[in-house]
Amino acid sequence: NAGVTQTPKFRILKIGQSMTLQCTQDMNHNYMYWYRQDPGMGLKLIYYSVGAGITDKGEVPNGYNVSRSTTEDFPLRLELAAPSQTSVYFCASSYEQSVNYGYTFGSGTRLTVV
Amino acid sequence: LAKTTQPISMDSYEGQEVNITCSHNNIATNDYITWYQQFPSQGPRFIIQGYKTKVTNEVASLFIPADRKSSTLSLPRVSLSDTAVYYCLVGSGTASKLTFGTGTRLQVTL
């Protein structure tokens, strides 16, 4: 059982470049989330989705876009990379949208923008 | 979600019991208390959740006093592999905005 899979694991981007961080889960979870974690800090929610075709902004959505065409996949798009987007990005999923249920996280994508 | 306060860091020797306390003075009636563990270069992992009194699983125990304004995560006989950051979260309902603070960085040494 793979759980939540993120690709790539590492990436270096130049300022102004774009890229898509991939996230897929095989647990048939309706709810999926993207977080970023800056060094020594907690996680901040970027975007989340409550099901295919439905997405909403989190705490720090600026500079990012998402789509959810299937239950399994929730890609995160960076259109014009900036140094402030250097961070570790985590994708997560859950069976329900409630804190009463555990969230399953991927292993992260470490992104550096130079 | 209710605001939580945890120690920034803790040190322990292998084999000792470690207790990490989280303060959540404004916890709401319907709020649950959840703890996550994060190893370096990995995403957080759900370890335990409780509402009141005591909850125990194969990884840890969670103690919650009657007033629920704090909670204590207890790790029995820690090993080097328990070195991680531990996050305390408090909330309920459809809280899509799960908020992680800076957590408690536990360092276990020989």
Image (spheres, rainbow, N blue to C red):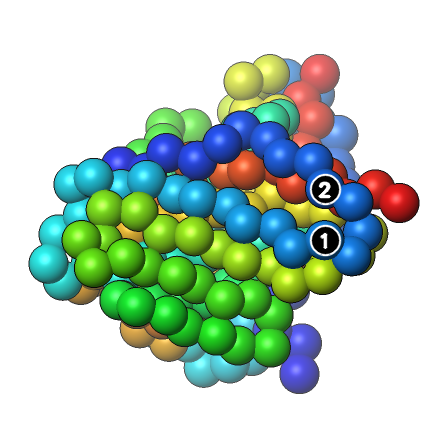
Establish whether labels 2 and 1 are both on one chain: yes
Task: Name the foreground residue: A13 vs B55.
Answer: B55
The image position of residue A34, as x and y in percent, is 46, 49
Q: Residue at x 66, y 41 (%)?
A: B106
* Depicted B27 relative to depicted A101: above or below: above
Q: In the image, is B108 to the left or to the right of A73?
A: right
Q: Residues within 10 Å of mark 2 (few under 14, many from 20)?
A: some
* Depicted B99 relative to depicted B91: above or below: above
Judged from the image, the secondary structure of the residue bearing numbered disc 1 is: loop
The image position of residue A22, as x and y in percent, is 60, 55
Q: In the image, is B87 to the left or to the right of B84?
A: left
Label pair 2/1, CB-CB below 8 angstroms: yes
* Depicted B37 relative to depicted B110: above or below: below
Residue at the right extreme, as displayed: B110
Quarter in which the C terminus of chain B is drawn: top right
Q: In the image, is B77 to the left or to the right of A52?
A: right
The image position of residue B64, as x and y in percent, is 32, 59
Chain on which label 2 sits? B
Residue at the left extreme, as displayed: B29
Judged from the image, the secondary structure of the residue bearing numbered disc 2 is: strand
Task: Name the foreground residue: A99 vs B19.
Answer: B19
Quarter in which the N terminus of chain B is drawn: top left
Chain on which label 1 sits? B
Residue denoted by label 1: B16
Q: Residue at x 62, y 26 (%)?
A: A39
Can residue B42 be seen in the rendering of this structure?
Answer: no
Q: CA distance from mark 2 to mark 1?
A: 7 Å
Residue denoted by label 2: B12
Q: Residue at x 48, y 55 (%)?
A: B73
